Each structure stands twice: as structure tokens, then as C-alpha cells.
Image (tube, grey):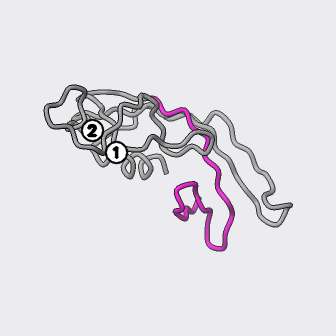
Amino acid sequence: MINHLVAKRFNSPFTVVSYETTRTADFDMIAGEMRGYEIFFKARVQFPRGANLDCAPGAAERPGDCTDDAYFSLIRPTRPTPNGRQYIEPGGTRLFDEDLRFAELKGGWKGPDGELYNP
């Protein structure tokens, strides 16, 4: 799952240096009509070639879809994922401290990105 989310968000080669599930929780959604599952994790991800190099601060012709937001998230309902592409310097490492919720559906678990996952 983490590999899919990082690839979808940054579209650049990366290595998950460390991953730790810090907590999990089962819960009922919609007054007990649907099961939910939440994963809290910390993942340290390195980008050997960087990401979105054209969004570097001070770039001569910086595209309009770049953002200077220093908050890095894959998906988080409590604070929106930054709008726009974020610059990561070559060799840069980012820590993602996330909590992701999944809803049980027929055939799998629907993730916060709308994708269906199977454990």
C-alpha cells in the first residue's frame, strides 16, 4: 500500500527506508452498518533522484502547479494533501506520519485514495 501511495503522489523513483505500524484500530462506520479499519504508521522514504525538480525554489521558469508547502502527506483527512507538486531535492528523505482509514466493501477494503485493497 505505501508503495502505491508514494508512487501515485510523487511519480519519481523512491526507496522506503523504514516503515513502522504504530497502531491499528477496528471500528464500526455508519451506525454499525459497515466495518472500518485504521492504520497509523510512520514511513521514511528516500528519493535518490529527487522529485519535481522543476519546482525547486528559485527555479527560473517554475510551473504554476508547484507549491512551497513543507507539509508532506500521502493522504490525510485531517489536513488536505498539499495542492500542487512538491519539490524534493536529489537524495532527499521525507517522513510520512500518517493515519489511513479503510472501509470494508465486497471484495476488499476501500482506501482513502478510492482504491480497493486486499489484505
Q: Are marks 2 and 1 in contact (CB under 8 Å)?
A: yes
Task: Identify the residue at image location x=58%, y=39%.
Answer: 79
* Residue 18, disc: none
The image quadrant of residue 57 is top left
Q: Nearer the viewer, residue 14 or 31?
A: 31
Task: Tell me if mark 1 has few (under 14), some (14-19) or many (20+) residues whose alpha carbon lies within 10 angstroms of its own.
Answer: some
Give 35 or 10, whichever is nearer the viewer: 10
Given residues 4 and 75, the one toward you in this image is: 75
Q: Earlier in the sequence, mark 2 or mark 1?
A: 1
* Amino acid type shown at disc 1: Phe
Quarter of the image for the C terminus: give it: bottom right
Residue 115 covered by magenta stretch:
yes
Image height of 116 relative to 23, above or below: below
Residue 69: % across, % down? 41, 31
Residue 23 pos. (x, y %): 68, 36
Q: Is residue 109 above or below residue 70?
A: below
Residue segment shown in magenta? 95-119
Residue 45 place in picture, x, y as percent: 39, 34
Distance (Cα) linking label 2 and label 1: 6 Å
SS for callout 2: loop
The residue pinned by badge 1 equals 10
